[in-house]
Image (cartoon, rainbow, N blue to C red):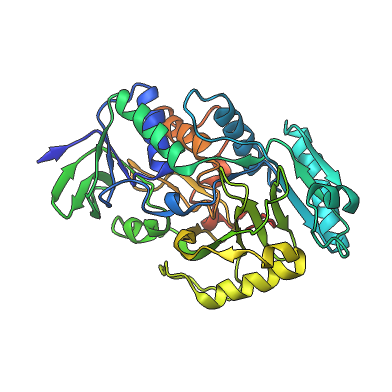
Amino acid sequence: MAEAETLVIGGGVVGASVAYHLAERGAKDVLILECEAEQGRGSTGAATGGVRAQFETEINIRMSVYSIDFFEKWDHDCGYEPRGYLFFATEPEHFAYLKRNVELQRSLGVKGVETVGPEAIREMIPGMNCSDILGGSFGRQDGFIDPLAVMRGFTERALDGGARLETGTRVLKILTKYGRVTGVETETGRIECGRVVVCTGAWAAELAATAGISLPVEPLRRQIVWACSPEPLPPKLPMVIDLGTGFHFRPAKNSERELMFAYPDPNERPSFSRELDDAFVEKIRERARHRAPWLYETEVVREKCRVGLYENTPDHHAILGGCEVEGLYFANGFSGHGVMHSPATGRALAEIILDGRASFLDVSMLSLNRFARGELLHETAFI
């Protein structure tokens, strides 16, 4: 019968980060189990690769500050490119919200974030319709990373530190006895272990239920339209986000003409569907035509469009830490922020597992039991 001291279920960017940080701390016999034939076929591979510190809650801001600093200084090429994030508002209350956030972000150590007016936005993004825009906020350290490169970097360092990786291994059940973890049942047999870390994203609730744990994580399809412009894009184009609708677009990596755009469709219902919806493509093109006519003139590159799954919690914040089953831990529910927060997440989980608590950053408000206590968090800018 196979054995390991710690099993990390899920080999995407979050699971890879947890394994890396455990190995870095000297944890022995860490085994990553990935259900697919290779890593990166789940949500990590479908992510847009955005990273930002422009959040509303202190915990999200602090996790971003730590993670951006990590990406900036990492000796692995993760593709970090600080092109900036621009949030813009068309309603007075939304602009006031952005102004409040900027003050909070600055107080928590975010650098290069400021409020901007319509003229600055017009100069930043030529050809954008700013007639109804009151202002916005711009974060210079925000930008882009390569999700698969981040995942590979964490995995390589974890393996260098003694961790192991098994692909094509699907976990069917978490095994427990007398209130503690004893192992897992996979499609190919049983693996005994003393600790399990669930990093399976949108599929986490199903796995948690096998251990008797109710995990409030739902899958939600996110569709990203990839398009090519007949003309070169505006130079140094940042991520651009309409706070009111969530419509956003960003340039593709290493291309002067390709870009991605998306928005959180309010009609989308929880499901595991990963099919591209033609009606959605047309709907988002109409949104693009209003905001930036040159976006509408782009040609959709269907083979490059991405469809992934968000792992949403009721308050759109992650679930980090243990639960009532001894030895069972979760890193799930990031609601679209898993890639950008993966460095902070991995370190937090490693400290919780090995030390009993995360000391570099207080993440106690992200514990699973906050839902039972009714202590939910709130983040408006959920895209």
- Frontmost residue, 143 versus 177: 143
Placement of 140 over or under 39, stated as above or below:
above
**Residue sticking out furthest to the bottom:** 279
- Frontmost residue, 362 versus 119: 119
Q: Position of residue 297 (x, y in %)?
A: 67, 66
Compared across the picture, whether 320 is left or right of 263 comes to left
Placement of 202 over or under 77, stated as above or below:
below
Position of the N terminus by quadrant? top left
Q: Position of residue 303 (x, y in %)?
A: 44, 62
Q: Position of residue 234 (x, y in %)?
A: 73, 49
Q: Position of residue 231 (x, y in %)?
A: 68, 55
**Residue sticking out furthest to the front:** 230
- Frontmost residue, 138 versus 83: 83
* Residue 375 appears in view: no
Residue at position x 64%, y 34% in the image: 65
Compared across the picture, whether 360 is left or right of 126 comes to left
Placement of 309 over or under 17, stated as above or below:
below
Residue at position x 69%, y 70% in the image: 287
Q: Which of the 4 image quadrants contains residue 133?
A: bottom right
* Residue 104 appears in view: yes
Residue at position x 52%, y 59% in the image: 313
Position of the C terminus by quadrant? bottom right
Q: Which of the 4 image quadrants contains residue 207?
A: bottom left
